[in-house]
Image: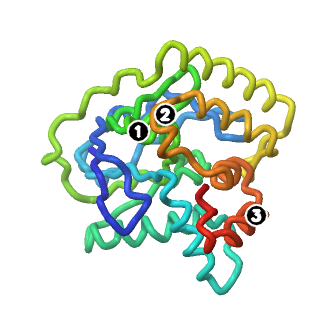
């Protein structure tokens, strides 16, 4: 079972969630590895609790960006994959404090190994955290809209019986007009993606803008919670020059615009 890790100091704390283990086990599901080959995802380790282990789905809104930049600026040496490194450090610290002496296992969204890969969108759906549009593989949060990212599922060797039954799936959060626009944007992004060699290390800027356009079709949360231009482009491209620009403008309070 899954719930929220509420650490007010961590911008990565995810919304409350309570999925059925059967949904997180993913048996019979086939997914892409991110590099072309499909495989079946493995079961989540739950310390022999037969589906009763406590787990957390952890993600972020745009609020992580400024915190990560200040963290990065304070580093003495260059950091490879700064967003993932920052998330791992903050989440690891919060989970360690919460778990105490209990064992835990973190499954990272950035870990593409078949034996460690978790379907984060499925976790968000079955936990009641987000509505998931299967047609476009798009998760939509009731407050943040499409502007969320998932970082980890953490399973802790603690009971989860106090959480009660899993919540119902969220009802659709897209209007027919938004869904039609998103469907067209998704098709265009897929078409453009088929023309380039994709990599987990980032995509070209023009392609990033097409995927960004699909998220922009969701009006919910967009006005308040949309990523800044720099955050959104870096999210897709992983271009270090964008980080340099964001750091240079951080003190001027323009990095999050």
Quadrant location of residue 12? Answer: bottom left
Q: How far apart are marks 2 and 1 (CA)?
A: 8 Å
Which residue lies most toward the front here? 252
Q: Which color scheme is applied? A: rainbow
Q: Could you say which disc has been placed on residue 240 in the image?
A: 3
Which residue has dot 2 on it? 139
The reply, left or right, for residue 238 in relation to residue 9 is right
Q: Could you say which disc has been placed on residue 209 in the image?
A: none
Q: How far apart are marks 1 and 3 (CA)?
A: 29 Å
The numbered mark, 3 or 2, whose residue comes first in the sequence reads 2
- Given contact means CB atoms under 8 Å apart, are the residues at marks 2 and 1 in contact? yes
Q: Which residue is drawn at 55% across and 61% down?
A: 65
- Judged by depth in the image, the label closer to the viewer, 2 or 1, is 2
Q: Could you say which disc has been placed on residue 124 in the image?
A: 1
Picture layout, residue 217 above or below residue 233:
above
- Tell me if mark 2 has few (under 14), some (14-19) or many (20+) residues whose alpha carbon lies within 10 angstroms of its own: many
């Amino acid at each position: 079972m899954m719930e929220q890790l509420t650490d007010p100091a961590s911008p990565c704390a995810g919304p409350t969630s309570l999925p059925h283990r059967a949904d997180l086990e993913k048996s019979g599901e086939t997914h892409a590895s991110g590099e072309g080959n499909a495989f079946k995802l493995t079961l989540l380790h739950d310390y022999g609790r037969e589906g009763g282990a406590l787990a957390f789905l952890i993600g972020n809104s745009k609020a992580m960006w400024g915190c990560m930049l200040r963290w990065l600026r304070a580093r003495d040496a260059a950091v490879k994959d700064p967003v993932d490194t920052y998330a791992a450090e903050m989440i690891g610290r919060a989970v360690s404090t919460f778990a105490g002496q209990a064992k835990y296992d973190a499954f990272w969204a950035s870990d593409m190994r078949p034996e460690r890969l978790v379907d984060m969108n499925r976790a968000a759906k079955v936990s009641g955290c987000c509505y998931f549009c299967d047609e476009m593989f798009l998760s939509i949060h009731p407050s943040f809209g499409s502007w969320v990212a998932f970082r980890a599922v953490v399973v802790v060797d603690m009971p989860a019986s106090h959480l009660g039954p899993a919540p119902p799936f969220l009802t659709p959060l897209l209007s027919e007009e938004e869904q039609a626009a998103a469907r067209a944007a998704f098709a265009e992004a897929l078409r453009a993606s088929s023309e380039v060699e994709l990599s987990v290390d980032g995509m070209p800027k023009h392609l990033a803008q097409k995927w960004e356009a699909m998220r922009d079709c969701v009006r919910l949360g967009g006005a308040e919670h949309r990523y800044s231009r720099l955050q959104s482009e870096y999210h897709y491209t992983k271009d270090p020059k964008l980080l340099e620009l964001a750091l240079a403008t951080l003190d001027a309070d323009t990095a999050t615009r």
